[in-house]
Amino acid sequence: MIFKIRSIQLLLLGFILSLFLLMGLMSVEQKFVLAAIAPDSQPIPLEITAPDLKSDVTDFLTGIPSSYYTISSIDTLKKALTNPQTLLIDVREKSEYQSGHIPSAINIPLRTLSQNLDQIPRDRPVILSCSTGYRSAMGVTTLHLLGYENVKGFPASYMGWKNAGEAIAKS
């Protein structure tokens, strides 16, 4: 269990750092100088300092609650799903979902989460699942960065559910 938690922590940190690197924030002390052209054609230098990456990452990581936004067991997931307001989202690709998924789960592949935010409520419990927990952890992090406070992941995901002998739905 400790190994799984550490794996999730490392995945989340890697995902977050990758996002910052992709945004071009490669240096904590990086400064950008822009020149604005005034009507008299005299350049006006504008200095913009990049955010403190280390501080931002530290703030994010220390803000993660001890439960790591997770549903930790199959029994806990089953109990959560008794609430008709709970939405279970399978973030695997369509073909994976069609070959078998947790009953009541809808399919929104991870790569399309940001294009399908209209299907993800902000006022009801949302649980993400995938094959082994990796993609659902990325999805949870992504949605939290987009301001969703009601999203949790199910790290055991589909494989844990299937290996426990639970019912499987096919589409």
Image: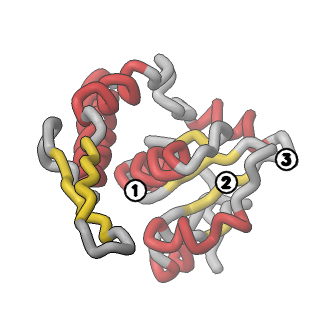
Element under label 1?
helix
Q: Does the image show residue 100? A: no
Dot 2: within a 10 Å radius of its alpha carbon, few (fewer than 14), some, or many (20 or more) residues? many
Q: Tell whether 73 sits left or right of 163.
A: right
Q: Any mark on residue 88, and which?
A: 2
Q: Residue 49: x, y in percent?
A: 25, 42
Disc 3 marks which residue?
Answer: 85
Residue 16 in which image quadrant: top left
Q: Is residue 150 above or below residue 76?
A: below
Residue at image x 27%, y 75%?
A: 41
| Residue at mark 1 | 135
Give the SS element for disc 3.
Answer: loop
Quarter holding the C terminus? Answer: bottom right
Of the numbered discs 3 and 1, the one sitting upstream in the chain is 3
Q: Position of residue 71 (x, y in %)?
A: 57, 34
Q: How far is the residue under mark 1 from the one under mark 2?
A: 14 Å
